[in-house]
């Protein structure tokens, strides 16, 4: 099967302890026809794991009921177009984090928790956009993998 023939697909999971693992497994299985190399698969896995873990941890914190997480994927000549949606809490101030890497010349115990994930997401993915639409979070991005 040629790369251009990968049909758009959707992966849906319920948030929870194993949601990221389950969604990643389904997503990577659906990409098998592209025969991506290890580096491309690793980029996808890293970006999606960060996004999904953020949704599970912050949009649907353990103290709140679980909810749906959907990943829509379309393959284009310039890569994979991802649309990730959830109905959890909005991002603070309705904006995604800047994704800037803070100072790393600190003692291990003084390192800040968090922030590194958004740095990875915004540097490995292209055209990253967040928007709150009604009661849903919409995160769109392009991963420049599987290009023709």
Image (tube, rainbow, N blue to C red):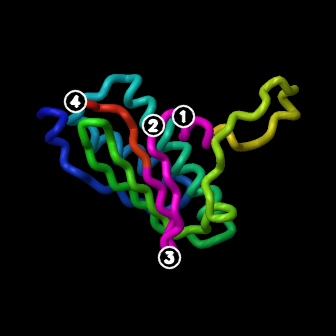
The residue identified by callout 1 is 123
Give how far across and how far down residue 23 sits, in percent: 42, 50
Q: Residue furthest bottom?
A: 134
Crowdedness of circle 3 by 10 Å Cα count: few (<14), some, many (20+)? few
Left or right: where does residue 11 sit relative to residue 108? left
The residue identified by callout 4 is 148
Q: What residue is shown at x 49% (from left), y 39% (from top)?
A: 47
The residue identified by callout 3 is 134
Q: Are marks 1 and 3 in contact (CB under 8 Å)?
A: no
Instruction: Indicate the quadrant where residue 106 lies.
Output: top right
- Of the two numbered discs 1 and 3 on the same chain, state the one appearing first in sequence: 1
Q: Are marks 4 and 1 in contact (CB under 8 Å)?
A: no
> Marks 2 and 4, Cα distance to the nearest angstrom?
20 Å
Q: What span is colored magenta in the figure?
A: 117-140
Q: Nearer the viewer, residue 122 or 27?
A: 122
Crowdedness of circle 2 by 10 Å Cα count: few (<14), some, many (20+)? some
Q: Nearer the viewer, residue 94 or 12?
A: 94
Q: What residue is shown at x 54% (from left), y 40% (from top)?
A: 121
- Quick one: SS at disc 2? helix
Crowdedness of circle 1 by 10 Å Cα count: few (<14), some, many (20+)? few
> Marks 1 and 3, Cα distance to the nearest angstrom?
28 Å
Q: Is residue 41 above or below residue 94?
A: above
Q: Which mark is residue 45?
A: 2
Left or right: where does residue 86 sit relative to residue 93? left
Give how far across and how far down residue 96 sits, in percent: 61, 54
Q: Quadrant of the C terminus?
A: top left
Q: What residue is shown at x 34% (from left), y 40% (from top)?
A: 28
């Amino acid at each position: 099967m040629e790369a251009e023939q990968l049909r758009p697909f959707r992966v849906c999971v319920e948030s929870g302890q194993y949601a990221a693992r389950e969604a990643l497994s389904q997503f990577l299985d659906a990409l098998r026809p592209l025969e991506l190399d290890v580096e491309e698969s690793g980029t996808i896995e890293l970006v999606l794991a960060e996004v999904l873990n953020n949704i599970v941890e912050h949009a649907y914190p353990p103290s709140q009921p679980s909810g749906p997480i959907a990943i829509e994927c379309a393959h284009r000549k310039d890569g994979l177009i991802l649309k990730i949606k959830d109905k959890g809490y909005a991002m603070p101030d309705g904006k995604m984090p800047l994704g800037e890497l803070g100072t790393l010349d600190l003692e291990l115990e003084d390192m800040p928790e968090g922030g590194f994930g958004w740095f990875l997401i915004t540097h490995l993915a292209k055209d990253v956009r967040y928007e709150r639409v009604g009661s849903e979070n919409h995160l769109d991005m392009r991963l420049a993998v599987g290009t023709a």
